[in-house]
Amino acid sequence: MLEMMLQGLSLIGLEQLLWMLVGVFVCQVIVIIPGLGGHFAVLMLLPFMYVLEPLSAIGLFMGASVTTGTGNTITGVFFGVPGSPTGIATIFDGFPLAQRGEGARAVAAGLTASVVGGVFGALVLGLSLPVIRPIVLSLSSPEFVVLIIAAIVSIALLRDGEWSKGIISGLAGLMLSFIGQEINTGTLRYTFGTLYLWDGLAILPVFMGLFAVAEMFHLVKRGGAIAKDTSLQYDKSGVRVGILDAFRYWKTTLRSSAIGVLVGVLPGMGGSAAQFIAYAQAAQLSPEREQFGKGAIEGVISSDAAVNATDAGSLVPTLAFGIPGSSGSAIMLAAFLAVGIRPGPDMLTKHLDIFWMIVWILILANVIAGVTCLLATKPLAKLTFVEGSLLVPPILFLALVGSYSSGLALGDLVVCLIFGFVGYVMMMTGYSRPNLVIGYVLGIILERHLFLSTALFGLEVLFRPAMLTILAVLSGGVFLAIRRRKQNQRKSAADALRSLDA
Amino acid sequence: MTDAGRGGLGSSASRDESTSSARETGDSDSPVAHINLIAAVLLGLTMFAFTLAAVFLAWNFRGASRLAPLIIGIPMLALLTAELQKDLRRLLAAQRSRSANALAAPPLKLADQDATATTERNILIWFVVLSALVVFFGFYVAIVAFTVAFLRFGGRHSLRLSVIHALLSVGSFYLLMEVVFRMRIFKGLLFA
């Protein structure tokens, strides 16, 4: 293992390091603009991966994707506005701290906790390899079929909102992936005589349309700049205190990081859930619990540490099984496939050096992102004043140009525009875009394993112990999730009645 | 631009959910929820039609190649039927409630409904304009024309700022895409 670790480190040359820095920097700038979110930044970098050498492309992409949660702290603390939903819990205590004139301390504590959380997650990812590897290698096609279906169902159930719409979106993604020439028999499906559709719908235009184009039209609807207040109190002397706070409350930092990793491993949960779970446990266990919500530094530390650790945790199922648990990891999977690397058992056998390279980049990118954010807090915070309408045209065109340049086909452009419209309508209606892209990415893998399962095992496939175990766990999970939903519905109905009575 | 439909911040996933949960709370009387409900029914119907066609076509595929579309498509049709039924029921209930309240509705609420519909219509218009410009005239013309029009009429910015923004954008795109990354830029159907 040590040899592979060093091999992974040796893959990071100056070029990869520079591209990683570009990724970190671009992501920090975009993530700070409320409403755009970190995954949006990552998505905008996807087209450039096609023109880079694979290892540099991984550097660029990983640098951006592992730091999606870092910049959130700044706007959350100073303006009470999160860059993305993963920064909401930071506001609870960060904003009151800023109002007391301790903004710099809160930002420094949050960013340091982010770095610790990210590094902790990377270490867990690396150290979990000896445990995960034999499990992954013992699974065969039938188990992967069930795991893929389990991922789609559980993501729909674990997220808030209507689970049936979530599952439909996942299935729609799977159906879309069947367009084109079928890999096992060569049959042309749903191509309608169009040459463009022989290879299926390209991933990049679909992703760009669903997220980038749709997001921009949502921004048009929302309009305006996010932060109106142009005053920004930043007392540099609080920075040192804040950094030390993250270590002074080391138990909170480490516990929240561990929670983040665990939540990240579960499909469909993500940083949005992790921050609240970590915040709640910090509030329960802290001796200063009465300060939570009024400006407790532990509140900022717990949520920020959890968010970055979640990103690393979500890499466990993505890299080991090739099954993404969130839209962010689905984008990551698409990026790896674009440069010819297939996460899953292949990565744990043939590309173990790349696995370790990713772990190292995870550590480096987290540290660099934390430091750059800390150094550039004030200028980054000012990005929040940018009027939304000024951002719409350049970002829209970046998405469209990126979609076109991946295949140089007019069809890619049309697909991007169509999915932009579909994505916008999905945002309005509660259908889940993350589930759709996860289904789309997993469709080809599902079909390959389905073909192998039926060809190799026939009906015996239904009696394989590993598959039955996964099915039993899935059924249990579904049962618990449905029960939890019903309990929540009953509780909200009772609350509504009580408020009416009052 | 209006503030109608202001749905809070957040990334894609969360916004997908927040819209949904807003509808789950039964607030279908609000203009935004009502338009969302209509959109949900239309999207559901479109997906149902496409899936039905996909399943029907899949019967004619050879052996293994029809397995996956049928295994996924048939349950999807069942789920879509249930979902459409649910959304249609909600929509009809909302329509009835709106008709009953129409006379009693304060003028402000009616104005809200108009504003919401106008916002959605404007977005649709911008979308069609963007698509037509890019497909027919290519990126360079589209960037300039769309940026100026959007900033001037959509963002209510000055003409000077709009033109400067458009020229800077087109220059940056040329430098980044064609010079630095050597990517080819689509020139449009009319100039191809």
Image (cartoon, rainbow, N blue to C red):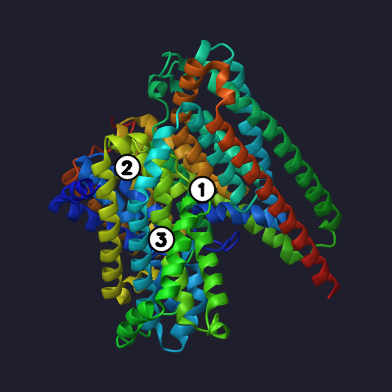
Q: Which residue is mark 2?
A: A402
User: What residue do we see at 52% from left, 52% from top?
Assistant: B13
Q: Are marks 1 and 3 on the same chain?
A: yes
Secondary structure, mark 2, is: helix
User: What residue do we see at 71% from left, 33% from top?
Assistant: B81
Numbered tag placed on residue B135 in the rendering: none
Type of residue at label 1?
A: Pro
Among numbered discs 2 and 1, the one appearing first in the sequence: 1
Gap between marks 2 and 1, in whole Å? 29 Å
User: What residue do we see at 36% from left, 54% from top?
Assistant: A41
Is A98 on the left or on the right of A484, as rendered?
A: left
Q: Above or below — where is A349 with respect to B3?
A: above
Among numbered discs 2 and 3, the one appearing first in the sequence: 3
Type of residue at label 2?
A: Gly
Is A407 on the left or on the right of A83, as rendered?
A: left
Label 3 near label 2: C-beta < 8 Å?
Answer: no
Is B93 on the left or on the right of B31, as rendered?
A: right
Q: Which residue is mark 3?
A: A309
Gap between marks 1 and 3, in whole Å? 15 Å
User: What residue do we see at 84% from left, 62% from top?
Assistant: B104
Q: Are marks 2 and 3 on the same chain?
A: yes
* In-front residue for pair A203/B168: A203
Q: Which residue is mark 1?
A: A267
Circle 2 chain: A
Is A19 on the left or on the right of B35, as rendered?
A: left
